[in-house]
Amino acid sequence: MTILVTGATGTVGRQVVQQLVQRAASVRALVRDPARARQAGLPAGVELAKGDLLDVDSLRSAFKGVSTLFLLNAVTPDEFTQALVALNLAREAGIERIVYLSVIHSDLYVDVPHFAGKFGVERMIERMGFNATILRPAYFIGNDLTVKDVVLGHGVYPMPIGSKGLAMVDTRDIAEIAAIELIRREQSETSLPLERINLAGPDTLSGLEVAAIWSEALQRPVAYGGDDTQGFERNLRNFMPGWMAYDMRLMAERFLSDGMRPETDDVERLTGMLGRPLHSYREFAASIAASA
C-alpha cells in the first residue's frame, strides 16, 4: 500500500519523503506543481499527486489506494479548515492510519491562533477514531536561519524566547520520527491506539543560553536582544502578513510566560526511537559559524 505525504516540498515534508524512501516505502506526495517538486529534489521514485488541501476533487484522487496519511499543513488563516477537509476525505477514502504534525503545548498556548487550530485538529482526529500518532514538535532549530545575519553581523540574538527555556528541535529528527511512526502504523496488522509524542531537542535553552552558544561558536560576544515582543511583531511585518506577525508575537509571549519545555522522559524516549543522540542547537550554531 501507499503512504501519502502532504506538505511534501516543505522543510519537514521533503525530509519525511526522503526518510520513507530510504525505508523502501511506497510514497505518494501531494504537490501543487509536480515540475517544481522534482526540481525541489523529491526522489524520482516518488509518485506525485497534483492538488492541495482545499481542492476536494484533487484530494479524492490523491487518496485513492492510500493506506496511511502524513498530514502536515502550513500556518495559514484557513489551516483548520484545510485539515478538517483532509480528515473527512481521508475517512471517506477508507484511510485509517494517520500521522499528524501538530505542535507542543497546543493545549496550553490557547490564545495563539495556530496552536489552537492544531489542537482542534488533534481533537477531531481523536473523535473520528483514526489510528493515529500526533507529533508535537517544539520550536524548530532551523527557524533561526532567519536571524543568522543579525547574529553574525550585529552580535545579537534577536529572538524573544525569554528565560523559561525552549526545547528546540532539529527538523531532521522530526522527519525521522515521523517516518518511523508512519512505517510502524503502515505495517501493523492490528489497529494501534492513538498516541501523542513530544518532539524536543536535547537541551532546553533560554535566550541568554542561546546567545552564549553563539558566543562560543563565533569566538566573540553575542548578546541576547531581550524580550520585546512588540518590536518582534513590527520586524516580522516587514516580510509576512500582519495576521501572521501577530500570531508569532502571541507565541513569543507564551515563550516568555510558559516556556516550551518537554516532559521528563521525552528526550530519552526520542533517542531510544532513533537509536542515536538528538541533534543539538550547539551543532547548528557551530555549522553556521564554520561557513561564515
Image (cartoon, helix red, strand yellow):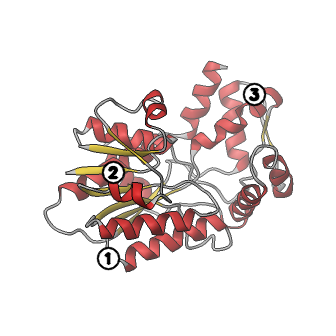
Q: Is residue 10 above or below residue 126?
A: above
Choose mark 2 or mark 3, whichever is in front. Answer: 2
Q: CB atoms at circles 2 and 3 under 8 Å apart? A: no
Q: Nearer the viewer, residue 268 or 32?
A: 32
Q: Which residue is mark 1?
A: 129
Amino acid tagged 2: Leu
Task: Report the residue that reaches farthest toward the bottom.
Answer: 127
Q: Which residue is mark 2?
A: 4
Task: Report the residue that reaches farthest toward the left.
Answer: 189
The residue shown at (54%, 68%) is 81
Q: Position of residue 100 (x, y in %)?
A: 41, 60
Choose mark 3 or mark 1, whichever is in front. Answer: 1
Amino acid tagged 1: Gly
Q: Which mark is first along the chain, 1 or 3?
A: 1
Q: CB atoms at circles 1 and 2 under 8 Å apart? A: no
Q: Position of residue 139 (x, y in %)?
A: 59, 52
Tag 2 secondary structure: strand
Q: Which residue is mark 3?
A: 152
